[in-house]
Structure formats: structure tokens, C-alpha cells
Image: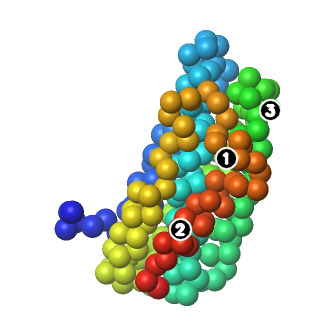
Amino acid sequence: MSDQQRDVIEVLEHDHREVEQMFAELESLRGAATDEEKARRKDLTDQVTIELVRHSVAEEVLVYPKVEKKVSAEEAEHARKEHAEAEETLQRLEKLDADDPAFDDELATLMREIRHHIEDEEGEMFAHMRKAIDADELRRLGRQVEAFKKVAPTHPHPSVPNTPLPRLAAGPAASLFDRMRDLATGRGTDD
Ligand SMILES: [Fe+2]
Ligand SMILES: [Fe+2]
């Protein structure tokens, strides 16, 4: 719609800022006392999970292959490894009730992993992409990432904020990461 298509780095950095905002609110809710605060914390955790999954899968399917080809295979590999670690943390986190003492620890682990990963991406990978990939291609990738994020669900289950994420009900085999990967690859990219 807009002719001011954001390039892929702008799109991804915007996502990073959103995630950091949610993390900051989650930190302010640590040790939440009231039911309302606890519900908000659980709800925010679900939201940040969905956002991280959509973002990470978009990167894995659309962005990292380009990085592999045009920037550095090692950098792409490193980023995929960090995604895999964060995915494991997310999977442990989703099995925990927000009242569980381990919940805060897993949440803190997730924040540490993701903040570190964002630093790596913005400080190194994205900077290298700007040098190695031309502006048109960066904009085209930006369009693809935005299109993917539109078809991916934006919220786990808005009407029932305090229940576990739907993928839990579907069993461990159908993790949201897997479903997103299918969705992203099934749509195909003109690569
Ligand atoms: Fe990212
Ligand atoms: Fe990433």
C-alpha cells in the first residue's frame, strides 16, 4: 500500500523494540501480587512467545538463507543455534504455571538469551547485510517478512488469556515453531 516499503532490517529491528518493551513490562511485573497482575504477566508471556516465534521463523525461512549466501554461513548458523536455545526455553516456559517459582527463572533465561541474540543480530549480522545486500533486495525481503507475519497468528487465544497456549493442547509434536515453519515454507518464496 505504501511506496515507502521498509527494508527487512527496519522491519526486524522494529520487532526487536516491541519485544524489548514487553520484556520491560514483564520485569516490572516480577513478583506480581494481585490476580490482575498475574493474569497480565501470563498474557504478556503468551504474547511475547507468539511474537518471538513469528519473528524467528520469518528470519529462519526468509532472511538467514540470504545471510548464508551473501554474508556468512557461520553467522547464519550461530543465529540458528541461538534460536534453537530460545525455543527450548520457550517450551519449558509454556509448561509452567505463572505461579510456579521456576516461571520467573525461565523468563529471566529467555530475556537474557533474546537480548544477547538481538545484540548479535543488530551489531553484526544486520550491519553486514547492509554492506553485502543491495537496497532493492533488502526491501523485497522486508515485504516478504511482513507478508509472512500477517498470515501468522498474532495472539495465542485472545478470548481465554489464562489457559495454556493452544499448541499445548495439540501435544508436543505440533509445536508452534513447527506449524509456523510449515506455514512459511508452504507459502514459498520466489527465491
Ligand atoms: Fe531478530
Ligand atoms: Fe533471530
Viewer-nearest residue: 171 or 135: 171
Give how far across and how far down residue 156 sits, in percent: 55, 41
Q: Earlier in the sequence, mark 2 or mark 1?
A: 1
Whole-angstrom CA distance, mark 2 to mark 1, is 17 Å
Residue located farthest toward the top when viewing the structure as drawn = 34
Q: Earlier in the sequence, mark 2 or mark 3?
A: 3
Contact check, label 1 and label 3, Cβ < 8 Å? no
Q: Type of residue at label 3?
A: Ala
Label 1: state its secondary structure. helix
Whole-angstrom CA distance, mark 1 to mark 3, is 21 Å
Residue 117 in which image quadrant: bottom right
| In the displayed structure image, the side of residue 188 where residue 162 appears, left or right | right
Label 2: state its secondary structure. helix
Q: Type of residue at label 2?
A: Ala
Give how far across and how far down residue 47 sits, in percent: 54, 40
- Residue in the image at 77% along x and 44% along y: 92
In this view, 14 is above or below 80: above
Q: Earlier in the sequence, mark 1 or mark 3?
A: 3
Give how far across and how far down residue 1 sits, in percent: 21, 63
Residue 36 in which image quadrant: top right
Mark 3 neighbour class, 10 Å CA radius: few under 14, some 14 to 19, many 20 or more: some
Q: Which residue is mark 1?
A: 167
Q: Which residue is mark 2?
A: 184
In this view, 77 is above or below 109: below
User: Which of the two marks, 1 or 3, is nearer to us in this view?
Assistant: 1
Q: Which residue is mark 3?
A: 102
Whole-angstrom CA distance, mark 2 to mark 3, is 33 Å
- Residue in the image at 53% along x and 68% along y: 184
Q: Type of residue at label 1?
A: Arg
